Image (tube, rainbow, N blue to C red):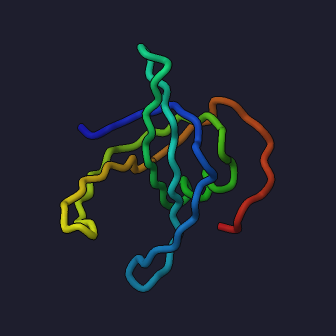
Amino acid sequence: MNKVELMGRLTKDVEVLTYNAGKEKKKMVKFSIAVQRKIDKEKVDFFDCVAFGVTAKALNDFVKKGDRIIVEGSIQTDIYTNKEGKNVKTYSVIVNDFYFTEYKKTDKKEEF
């Protein structure tokens, strides 16, 4: 089973990107969260996250840098070759759902 739940703070505002889905153009969001470790609270792990569809729209509309949220999803692994010819493995959380842990009124962002 590939399932992950993380609670952390957004390290920056979500970034809206457009991608091709067949002949359609669709939008997605990318963002990163900082998650404090339970045992060693001095240490923080950073996770890159991606969301699509209504989840992406809601994230774009309602969260901003510094907000604490819980994300639920799965881990995706990608491998690419960098400029030096070395294979690089990356990990991303594909967000299926998210939850507010605190609510702050935000200004409307980029139209989604």
Identify the residue shown where x is 48% and y is 59%: 52
Instruction: Spot the residue most to the bottom.
Output: 23
Instruction: Spot the residue most to the top.
Output: 39
Identify the residue shown where x is 60% and y is 58%: 57
**Residue 67: x, y in percent?**
65, 38
Using residue 76 as the reference point, say whether residue 5 is left or right of it. right
Using residue 1 as the reference point, say whether residue 40 is left or right of it. right
Quadrant for the N terminus in the image:
top left
Residue 19's place in the image compared with 10, above or below, is: below
The answer to which image quadrant residue 22 occupies is bottom left
**Residue 63: x, y in percent?**
66, 46
Residue 19's place in the image compared with 89, above or below, is: below
Using residue 86 as the reference point, say whether residue 65 is left or right of it. right
Instruction: Spot the residue most to the left.
Output: 86
Identify the residue shown where x is 63% and y is 30%: 101
Instruction: Count the numbered circles shown.
Output: 0
**Residue 68: x, y in percent?**
61, 34
- Given residues 4 and 91, the one toward you in this image is 91
**Residue 94: x, y in percent?**
40, 50
Quadrant for the C terminus in the image:
bottom right
Residue 23's place in the image compared with 47, above or below, is: below
The answer to which image quadrant residue 39 occupies is top left
Residue 99's place in the image compared with 90, above or below, is: above
